[in-house]
Image (cartoon, coloured by chain):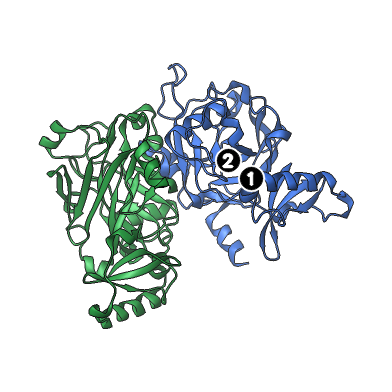
Chain colours: A blue, B green
Amino acid sequence: MRLVTYAGDGGPRPGAVVGDRVLDLGGFAGSVTALLADAAALDAARAAVDAADAHALPPLELSALEAPVVPGKILCLGYNYRGHVPDGVDPTADDPEYPDVFVKTPNTLAGPNAPVVIPPGATDVDYEGEVAVVIGRRAQRVTLEDALDHVGGYTILNDVSDRAWQRRQSQWALGKCSDGFAPLGPWIVTPDELGDPQDLLVEVVRDGVVTVSQSTSTTIFSVAYVIHHLSQVLTLEPGDIVSTGTPQKLPAAQDAHRPLAPGDAVTVRISRIGELTTTFVAAADASQEATA
Amino acid sequence: MRLVTYAGDGGPRPGAVVGDRVLDLGGFAGSVTALLADAAALDAARAAVDAADAHALPPLELSALEAPVVPGKILCLGYNYRGHVPDGVDPTADDPEYPDVFVKTPNTLAGPNAPVVIPPGATDVDYEGEVAVVIGRRAQRVTLEDALDHVGGYTILNDVSDRAWQRRQSQWALGKCSDGFAPLGPWIVTPDELGDPQDLLVEVVRDGVVTVSQSTSTTIFSVAYVIHHLSQVLTLEPGDIVSTGTPQKLPAAQDAHRPLAPGDAVTVRISRIGELTTTFVAAADASQEATA
């Protein structure tokens, strides 16, 4: 299934994508997170999707999509694809023994259609296209073997960063946590539909140019390992996001890279998930939109 | 005022401490966060406190206190008191130009009476007694001059850390974000009652020994500066916590330091706020308590 949260008359509604239509799932659970956490409701929703007559359903309005979940926490990996070495890490070193984990705060969450505001004075805003794991079942000290049972699905996160702020301290929080710096979506693909999470092509397209193209088969830490690992330290709850890191930009894209500016658009596309396009705007533009 | 959240019959209630009694403030707002965010309700609550007949009020049951707010985000400073240099920072360097900021996730929040579970396998758990600023009014790009107007009050946070995890990566998240690693409370002291936040003595007592004793007058970054600074990058919301860093342990305490173990208790006491005592338990003990 492809699960969405979409704007309804009475607020956000959970739904499933059926072809180019949407099936309302509000009768099964109050939110996508609640649905993921309730195996019986999820089974019932799946049966309803299988039985649905697509022609009788309303069209899926992409513009009505909101972030598919509102995560309690967003945990991100800083260094997970071979060849991608973040600022401050020795590029000649071997694979790290442990994932480097940081947090994006709740104010970073943005829906798949929300433009990202480039904060006033920000001079080095960058994108990172990532596979985001959505927790379905609470995970506390789960074994490696059981870890994937706690995954509710997969979506796309653009881990937007202000590199200038990121470099100013040892900890990256201020480079990672500006408002709206975590566009998420457009939908969650459940594990049965996604297949092997270690066989996904992650690509980023900027200005019509593919700047990132690398398979999740090249990650240092698998999704199962990351869930297992994180759950030894803290409890993962339904709806939490674990974003699995970014591949390095392709060499030509590294050479041509310039910071994101108002008017730029970045598309992250991941096989068997879909694509997430984020536009970047100046702060003043955003204010005008908010009052329009 | 001293604002508390306490367990009532119908769930958590906001209240004010009046002597050794508590005045229910549920008629003014649904929570302490809502009260802090609503200037008119806060004024009305203050008038009610001033008019209250303490003898007619129920006693303040410290055991009924919960975390005074449920923050949307908990932002912490890693290096703010002169003389305290965190792991990985050059101790001979000058004052840092910017605060080093990290995040504690929502699962870290614990009430003032909650024991902290030492995670299985954790070998180097440590405490940090800190002044925690509670945001009262949304703060987005506020000037230094206006910054304190956005503070709703002050409380105490014990920034519990697993140093072994903290040292394993460049980013500290896994050392900072175990469940319950942010005991908060016991109450929020409003700015009018607290006075100058740069004139507070922060002390920690472990096993009857004072291990930390340093004034907030020795911080590198004032509360006003930190709120101003953070608000340039992200929006602070009512109820958010900004924890202002820890002083270095006293030399004798550094020499005598051993990791926290089950049965240990740590008291953080801060002048004009109060004290927060946290007990540490093994994971098995916690399970027994939860099922008792």
Front-most of residues A83 and B188: B188
- Residue A135 numbered mark, or none: 2
For label 2, the SS is: strand
Front-most of residues A133 and A281: A133
Front-most of residues B46 and A64: B46
Q: Amino acid at mark 2?
A: Ile
Residue A40 screen position, x and y as percent: 68, 46
Chain for mark 2?
A
Q: Amino acid at mark 1?
A: Leu
Say whether residue B178 is visible. Answer: yes
For label 1, the SS is: helix
Residue that appears at 55% across and 49% down: A109
Total count of labels: 2
Q: Would you name the residue on which mark 1 appears?
A: A36
Q: Quick one: label 1, few (<14), some, or many (20+) residues within 10 Å?
A: many
Whether discs 2 and 1 lie on one chain: the answer is yes
Above or below, B270 against A171 in this view is: below
Side of A103 relative to A261 (left or right)? left
Q: CA distance from mark 2 to mark 1?
A: 8 Å
Marks 2 and 1, the one that precedes in the sequence: 1
Residue that appears at 28% across and 32% down: B87
Residue B30 screen position, x and y as percent: 45, 70
Identify the image quadrant of residue B237: bottom left
Residue that appears at 48% across and 37% down: A140
Identify the image quadrant of residue B21: bottom left
Side of B166 relative to A188 (left or right)? left
Side of A8 relative to B291 (left or right)? right
Above or below, B21 against B68 in this view is: below
Residue A241 screen position, x and y as percent: 55, 41
Residue A262 screen position, x and y as percent: 58, 49
